[in-house]
Amino acid sequence: MSTTKTITVAYGDGIGPEIMESTIKILDAAKSNLRYDTIAVGEKVYNKGIKSGIEDNSWDIISKNNILLKAPITTPQGGGVKSLNVTLRKTLGLFANVRPCRAYHPFVKTKHPDMDVVVIRENEEDTYGGIEHRQTYEVYQCLKLITLPGTERIVRYAFEYAKSNGRRKVTCFTKDNIMKLTDGLFHDMFKTVAKEYPDIESENLIVDIGTARLADTPEQFDVVVMPNLYGDIVSDITAQISGSVGMVGSANIGVKTAMFEAIHGSAPDIAGQNIANPSALIQAATMMLRHIGRFTQADNIHNAWLKTLEDGVHTPDIFSEASKVKASTQDFTQAIIDRLGQKPETLSKVSTSGAFKVQIPELKISRSENKPSATQKRTLTGVDVFVYWEPDTTDLLAERLKQVTGNEFELTMITNRGTKVWPNANPETFCTDHWRCRFKSKKGKTTQFQVVDLQKRLTKHAIDIIKTENLYLFDNEPAFSAGQGE
Ligand code: NAD
């Protein structure tokens, strides 16, 4: 008999409390031997004026128990509130988001009866840093940050997941034909790490065609790993085509803490009606049980749930001609409890001893003795100065800049929205009020002082600087993108 484990639970908003009650009833009926510390999150907390949606003392409870089972919450629109989900993932370092999306044909309608795809999404980086600025009257910016350790961790996790769960292939989605540095890093890391797993097939696809193929023939995919934003979109598509977003749970895995949740939202349109499908949160709970090593209980619940689907006991969202009983949330819950100990006959039963518990990967590249900061030479070679300037006066801007460039630098290029507009603009290129002016050191190497002096000269000559980006060489290779058309 396992020792009692205390987990943290959050009942959330909308249908959250109904599906959480259902899930806990099933966990208890399967003798999961859990205790629950409940924290308040979401609307109730936002309404107290707490913009994070979580009270300060809840963090200690989450950290003490290391496991959070969370129902969906309603994120208020506007009002300066931050998404609680993103805050939880980032604050607790939950770097991997794992969503298994499997078809339950012929019991739940799907166009893809053979699909069984696990989407592994990087969970902390990319544009989800939420670092955004309005820089000029016309231009808004969101920073996309892809890091070496973050990428190494998620890519290694995807291969470790495949290995621990008997999966045959890992596919990576990137857009490195356009974002050569950020997505290029992700793709390169994927190729490097893949070599350590010769028994697992690996492939990289550009995210657009990859998503198209995944939506068309998901049975050709197995484990798919990608940066945060693509993963957010692709995992919902994958869940939806498997049958319903109401059926898919997700695990958010960190080094110390893990959070398990349904992928759908709080469904306020059906809240309080006892018709919500609790399956996604139940799925999340079985992933949680496996994560803490309770495989027997996880398999028992999972198989009883599959048997319930097979017996045609379905909540209204998945009710179709294959269904027999239109069940309320509570009836569906009871049907699962009644089937504990039973196994499905048509759908493959689960037997997962040892699976899902994935070792948190060691960072062998980004935190090793040979990490780039120990081995690569970093040289400052120039600066991109972004300025606010009226549209359609490029030559005038170039003339003004050249007057103050000085001996240290030369003005090599001006771009607008990333496209070269000086020298030799194409008159058809549309320009806004946001210009990138590239100054390169004539000697190939400069100093922070020279860069600051250049900015001082520009400012004295009434050039309105919005921001700057230093240009570096790493081992003499340029580490900045060229202008479109340069
Ligand atoms: P939603 O997922 O809540 O609902 C979309 C549709 O699916 C609705 O018609 C809903 O009735 C249905 N649906 C969702 N889950 C269902 C279930 N378990 N059973 C039956 N039907 C179900 O998405 P939304 O309407 O865009 O968002 C509602 C709120 O949820 C928003 O405030 C949003 O910010 C929030 N949200 C929270 C999370 C989370 O907490 N993890 C995730 C997504 C959205």
Image (cartoon, grey):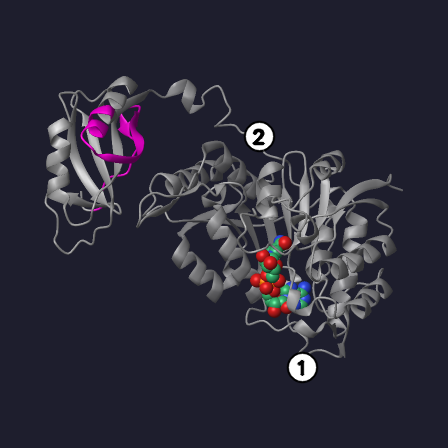
Which quarter of the image is occupied by the N terminus? top right
Image: magenta residue range = 456-484
Above or below 287: residue 22: below
Does residue 462 show up magenta in the picture? yes
> At x 67% / y 82%, what residue is drawn?
321
Above or below 91: residue 76: below
- The reply to whether the C-beta atoms of the residues labelled 2 and 1 are less than 8 Å apart is no
Specify the amino acid type for callout 2: Glu
Residue 362, labelled with which disc? 2
- Find numbered disc 1 in the image and state the secondary structure of the residue it sits on: loop
In the image: residue 216, left or right of residue 19: left
Does residue 45 show up magenta in the picture? no
Regarding residue 398, the answer to whether it shows in the image is yes
The answer for how far apart the CA atoms under marks 2 and 1 are is 49 Å
Residue 259 is drawn in which quadrant?
Answer: top right
**Mark 1: few, some, or many residues within 10 Å (few <14, many ≥20)?**
few
In the image: residue 82, left or right of residue 464: right
- Find numbered disc 2 in the image and state the secondary structure of the residue it sits on: loop
x and y percentages locating residue 74 in the rendered image: 63, 56
x and y percentages locating residue 453 in the rendered image: 24, 21
Query: Which residue is identified by label 1?
Result: 321
> At x 16% / y 50%, what residue is drawn?
392
